[in-house]
Image (spheres, helix red, strand yellow):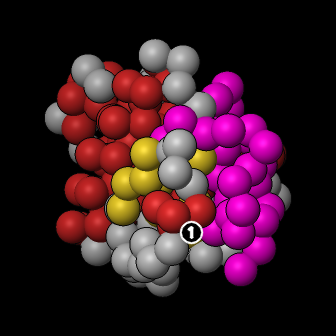
Amino acid sequence: MFDNITQVAPNLWIGSYPMRPPSEGFDKMIVCCGDLEGFKDRFPNTTIIESPIDPHNPTAENAQLAVQTGRAVAGWLRRGLKVLVCCSSGYNRSAFVAAITLMVMGRDSHEAIETIQKAVERALHNQNFVGVLKNLEGARAFIPAMGAG
């Protein structure tokens, strides 16, 4: 487990599990795995939300959960809250949720992926996540609902 945390958009960071409270003082932390053991004790002033996503091949249920999470994160960002989305290494699951958040806020999948990868070079190297992002954008009924967040 590392402490690599990178800002990818205003008030939005991605990274690996922080072992100690980051100096940025996040309002919300999304943990993209199923293991929250010890998180709430280490971060008593941060709201921690579990959003478990398969680390290798995101399922339809994972995509639906990531969209719900992305909508929530977009709403928090619009209210000026600081959000960290984290997973084991900070490259795919956290970047996936962050990219969906950027799509909710009006970017297309290409812009969202590019923004994340400019900030974190190894982000979204798993093409399964990239494919899901492009498919989500392709589902036109999904886009208006995203903007409503």
The quarter of the rendered structure image containing the N terminus is bottom right
Q: Is residue 129 above or below residue 29?
A: below
Identify the residue shown where x is 29% and y is 74%: 59
Residue at the spot of label 1: 87
- Magenta segment's dominant SS is loop
> In the rendered structure, does residue 5 fall within the stretch colored magenta?
yes
Residue 133 in sight in this render: no
SS at badge 1: strand
Question: What is the x, y in percent for residue 109?
Answer: 50, 42
Percent of width and height locating residue 107: 51, 28
Q: Is residue 45 visible?
A: yes
The residue that appears at 54% across and 18% down in the rendered structure is 80
Provide residue 86's location: percent of width, then percent of height. Answer: 58, 60
Between residues 11 and 28, which one lies in front from this camera angle?
28
**Residue type at numbered disc 1:** Cys
What are the residue bounds of the magenta stretch? 1-28
The residue nearer to you, when weighing 38 against 134, is 38
Q: Residue furthest top?
A: 79
In the image: residue 36, left or right of residue 21: left
